[in-house]
Image (cartoon, rainbow, N blue to C red):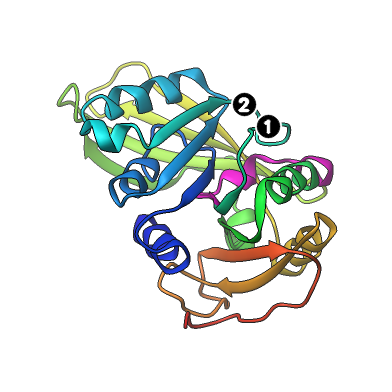
Amino acid sequence: DVTFYRQLAKQRLGTSGNILELGAGSGRITIPLARDGHEVVAIDQMPPMLARLHQRAEKLSKSTAKRIQTVSADICTFSVPETFSLAIAAFNVLEHLYTRVEFEACLRRVAAHLEPDGAFAFDVQLPDLEWLVRDPTKRWAKTRYTDPVTGRAMLYTTNHDYDPVSQIAIIRLYYQPVAGGPEDVVLLSQRKYFPAELEALIAHGGLRMVERYGDFVGGPLGPGSESQVLVCRRGIGRVARTSRRG
C-alpha cells in the first residue's frame, strides 16, 4: 500500500504537493511521502502514535522533517487552515468509523479540505463472508514466531465476534509464550463495509467515486480481493473506473 499511495501522489501532484493524511499513526506512509518531496499534514488522535512519528522524524534530514506537520484531532471533526490536492486514509483507517453518521462526518470534513480538483484515496477490507461467520469459540490463524524484543518463541492465534446488524467485528489477538506463561490479549474492533454500501455512503457524504480497485496494483475488485481501494472526488456521480489504473 505504501507504493500505491506514493505512486498516486506522484501521478496527481508530480514531485511536490500538499497531502492530508487521516489516521497517520507512527508515520509509516507519512515519512515516505515527505521523502518524496510532499508536504504532509498528518492527523491522528492517539498521542503515543504521534510521539512515535516525531521520534522517527527527528532522524530524517531537516528538509524532509520540515515537510511533516502533525495534528492531534479526531478525523470526524478536524479542521486545519489549508486545503489539499490529495487526502488519504491508508490501512483500513475508515473501518474505525462505526456508524453512518461518523462516516459521513469524516467525508464531509475531507471534502471541506479538498481543493476543487483534489482527490481522496483510501482503502478498507472487502468483507469475507466465510471469515465473518467463523466459530468465535475456536482459535484461528495459529502462527509460531520469535518475539523480536525478548527472543522468546511465541504462539499467535485469533478469533472474533461479528454482529451482522452493526457490521462490527470485535477481534481478539492472542499472544502466548510457547514455553508457558501469561497470555496477552489485544482487542481490535472494525466496521465492515460492503462495496455497494460503501459507494452509497460516499455519495451521501458529498464525494463521488472515480476509481475502485481490488488491490494496490490496480487489479479489479472481485471475489478474490482482500481490499477495496478507492479514489474519490468532490461532487456526486457514477464510478468512472473500476479496474486497471491508467
Which residue does the numbered mark 2 point to in the structure image?
73
Distance from disc 2 to disc 1, alpha carbons, whole Å, reads: 6 Å
| Relative side of 59 to 181, left or right | left
Camera sees residue 117: yes
Magenta region, residue range = 87-102
Q: Are marks 2 and 1 in contact (CB under 8 Å)?
A: yes
Question: In this orientation, which residue lies closer to the viewer: 22 or 67?
Answer: 67
In the rendered image, residue 94 lying in the magenta stretch gets the answer yes
Which residue does the numbered mark 1 point to in the structure image?
78
| Relative side of 93 to 147, left or right | right
Question: In this orientation, which residue lies closer to the viewer: 69 or 215?
Answer: 69
The image shows residue 186 at horizontal and vertical percentages of 48, 27
Amino acid of disc 1: Phe
Camera sees residue 133: no
Compared to 173, does 8 lie above or below?
below
Amino acid of disc 2: Ala
Q: Residue at x 52, y 72 (%)?
A: 214
Q: Secondary structure at mark 1?
A: loop
Q: Secondary structure at mark 2?
A: loop
